[in-house]
Amino acid sequence: MQAGVISLVLAYVLSQFYRAFLAVLAPALEADLGATPADLSCASGMWFVVFAAMQIPVGAALDRVGPRRTASVLFALGGAGGALVCALAQSPLHIVFGMVLLGIGCSPVLMASYFIFARVYPAAVFGTLAGVVLGIGSLGNVASSVPLAWTAEAIGWRGTMFALAAISLTIAGLIAAFVKDPPRAEADRRGSVLDILKIPAMWLILPLMLVNYAPSAGTRGLWVGPYMADVFAADAARIGLVSLVMGLAMIAGNFVYGPLDRWLGTRKWGVLAGNLLGALACFALAGLTAGNIWIVTVLLAMIGFFGASFPQMIAHGRAFFPAHLTGRGVSLLNLFVIAGVGAMQFVTGRVHAARAAVAESPADPYATLFGLYGALLLAGVAIYAFSRDRTD
């Protein structure tokens, strides 16, 4: 089982990479294919939309056929296939199609590992294991920055994508070879995601799931570059440094949140406090967008760190699921998280454009964005405060 989990973690590293790599390749894709920022924004958004939509069939497949076939087949066809389509692209539309395939391929890998943790390992360590996977997987986010730029410069962006297709296919083979499906629970073939939605406790957890990751993922993946360039006239090196600091803070947050329930004896209150601090950091940035660049960098790192509550929230929700609906349950929670990020990619783009049209300074649109992020987190926290705490 350990070798299988390692192979799934490697796939998740690539999943994190694929959701963020377009930003670095943007100049090359514009020069070779005529891809505009709008084209790449659409492609990136489609990754999240497709990834979220896949969580329903992925959850059912995990419960019915197990993680080995679900993850290996989808990652081979979608992960390797999507990277290959991007490598062969002749127009921006091909990049969009490649990102759709990548979203399909990446959709099962994290939930497959969580399914194994929930069904094989002691329940009390679920949050810790979930945080470790996210922390290690977030290295893919780091790899999609400076290392990708170096590689693309050395062998070209097409050569890089061909190499990624080969690596993805190899990892899919490792998943097929080493992942062992957990024993099937009784009544595995009965029930649906609707049974999860009938659990009253879910309705006080899901709203925060929808918004908790959007500020950190959206800022790191979409807005940190334009924000630093427009407000602080930062060059590529400074933007890369700030992005790296925020990415490392997100990794650290995963490792800290993971075992938090065992340290504090609660899941609810650690998550609530962390997201409240993340909201305060958003509001602080809304008021300090033209302030000292190092203070701003610290606040961005705080958004990344405190926005990493995903593993604890998954652990909190999972504690209410019956065993035979584990796959559907964790995938439903993941759907809300990724759908929230994807939706906010489109919403924040429109909000920024509308605010920029009437702004008196370059900082104004970003102040509005951070204020929106903070308000959404605060609303999610207010609902989550009434949820029922449950630990294993």
Image: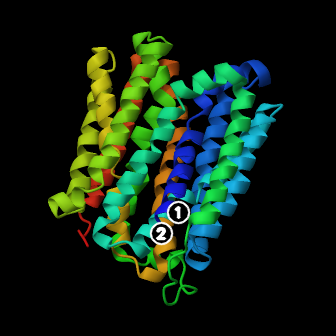
Where is residue 382? Give x, y as percent.
26, 55
- Residue located 46% across and 39% down the image: 139
- Residue located 59% across and 22% down the image: 150
Q: Residue furthest right?
A: 90
Q: Which residue type carries mark 2?
A: Phe
Relative placement, left or right, of 188 versus 161 is left
Pointer 2 residue: 115
Label 1: few (<14), some (14–19) or many (≥20) C-alpha neighbours in 10 Å: many
Q: Is residue 138 above or below residue 143?
A: below
Considering only order in the chain, which callout, 2 or 1, is on the residue closer to the N terminus?
1
Relative placement, left or right, of 176 versus 311 is right
Pointer 1 residue: 4
Where is residue 86? Give x, y as percent.
75, 37
Q: Residue furthest left?
A: 264
**Quarter of the image where the C terminus is located:** bottom left
Q: Is residue 183 above or below residue 158?
A: below
SS assignment at label 1: helix
- Is residue 212 visible to the viewer in this orientation of the structure? yes
- Residue located 45% across and 75% down the image: 196
SS assignment at label 2: helix
- Residue located 64% across and 64% down the image: 176
Where is residue 298? Give x, y as percent.
28, 26
User: Which label sits on residue 191?
Assistant: none
Q: Nearer the viewer, residue 16 or 23?
A: 16
Where is residue 137? Give x, y as percent.
47, 46
Relative placement, left or right, of 166 versus 229 is right
Q: Which residue type carries mark 1?
A: Gly
Task: Estimate the spatial distance between the alpha carbons at disc 1 and disc 2, rounded to whole Å.
Answer: 12 Å
